[in-house]
Amino acid sequence: MNQVPSTSRNGQQPPSGHSSNGRLERALRAGRFAVTAELNPPDSADPEAVYSRALVLSQVCDAINATDASGANCHMSSVGICALLTRAGYSTIMQISCRDRNRIAIQGDVLGAAAMGVNNILCLTGDGVQVGDHPQAKPVFDLDSMTLLETIKSMRDEGQFLSGRAISAPPNVFLGAAANPFAPPYDWRPLRLAKKIAAGAQFVQTQYCFDLAMFETYMAKVRDLGLHEQCFILAGVGPLASARAARWIRSNVPGVHIPDAIVSRLEGAADQRREGQELCVELIQQISEITGVAGVHVMAYRQEELVSEIITSSGILKRRRPRRETGLATAD
């Protein structure tokens, strides 16, 4: 089927070769080392709880992830956060988890998000409800991450719903997915990435990268398959608050691998919190030198105030124009 031309919220066509008018896609296609970060959603209906966290992230980020009940825990919704932030001019990535909504609700959310000005969508299967704070909830999983990518790609490129009905103004969105180089079977992980790219992923954000040797092995295979030329890869990073926190994360957060050497380094530090920040800075610097890595995705749970300091200290922004320190980020 022929691709249906679409326009953005302001009526402008995306630039040639782009899927959206968003800042993140422009930065990546221009060859800039991109930075994204997660905004930890509040357990609150107060919009200021969102704006205060977004402000410190926007000073160094090309886009801010609005998480969708990550870990199957209830917080302010991803679409609600995106509504607040796009209205204020921030660049957002709306996460969609297949756990909680069926294909009817998801496709409606995609159109609503695009109408608000959301240019980036991250497609996730989602954690099972048994790991979250509502284990009695009924999971949906009508789609998974692969079929969600295919669904939104069809909405965008073919201008139709899964039912076959036409969409009069398709959504201009840059499609993303998650990747975990650290979950067995390790040799299969690059092949899993290839499948997500085939389904429609244009960028991926990985799980935390604390084992650099393992990540380099993964990226070598990715390059052998030519996947780094088909998709922008943003490596996940984040500060560890202490050795105790590191042990808890690797024991309780599915898919996170933290080597013993990292835990030992934190244990031996006089100031473990500061050591965790310095470790994150070092990892960003080393990751930025790996061929095929297009950026980093910073996950600092309840520590958004550290993201700007970490990114600035890493030096990866030295060739970028400083962001304005105002309540409004550069529009997406």
Image (tube, helix red, strand yellow):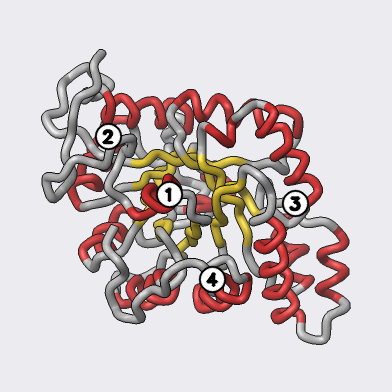
Counting residues from the start of the chain, the first of labels 4 and 3 encountered is: 3
Which badge, 2 or 1, is on the more N-terminal residue? Answer: 1
Q: Is residue 324 visible?
A: yes
Mark 4 crowd level (few <14, some 14–19, many ≥20, 10 Å Cα): few
Mark with earlier residue (2, 3): 2
Mark 3: few, some, or many residues within 10 Å (few <14, many ≥20)? many
Q: Residue furthest front?
A: 319
Q: Is residue 319 left or right of residue 68?
A: right
Q: Nearer the viewer, residue 246 or 33?
A: 33
Mark 4 or mark 2: which is in front?
Answer: 4
* Residue 198, horizontal then vertical, whole percent: 49, 24
Kindly indicate the quadrant of the structure image that contains residue 13: top left
Dividing the picture into quadrants, the one containing residue 16 is top left
Question: Which residue is more in the foreground, 2 or 117?
Answer: 2
Q: Amino acid at mark 2?
A: Gln
Structural distance between the alpha carbons of marks 3 and 1: 32 Å
Mark 4 lies on residue: 318
Towards the viewer: 176 or 283? 283
Query: What residue would you read off at disc 1?
Result: 30
Q: Quadrant of residue 287?
A: bottom right
**Mark sitting on residue 257:** 3
The x, y position of residue 56, in whole percent, is 43, 76
Contact? badges 4 and 3 (CB < 8 Å): no
Question: Which residue shows up at 73% across the image and 63% down it?
Answer: 248
Instruction: Tell me if 295 is positioned left or right of 162 in this view.
Output: right
- Which numbered disc, 3 or 1, marks the residue closer to the eye? 1
Q: Is residue 104 above or below residue 166?
A: below
Which quadrant, please, contains the N terminus? top left
Q: Is residue 219 left or right of residue 327?
A: right
Q: What distance separates the C-alpha of mark 1 from that of mark 4?
A: 16 Å
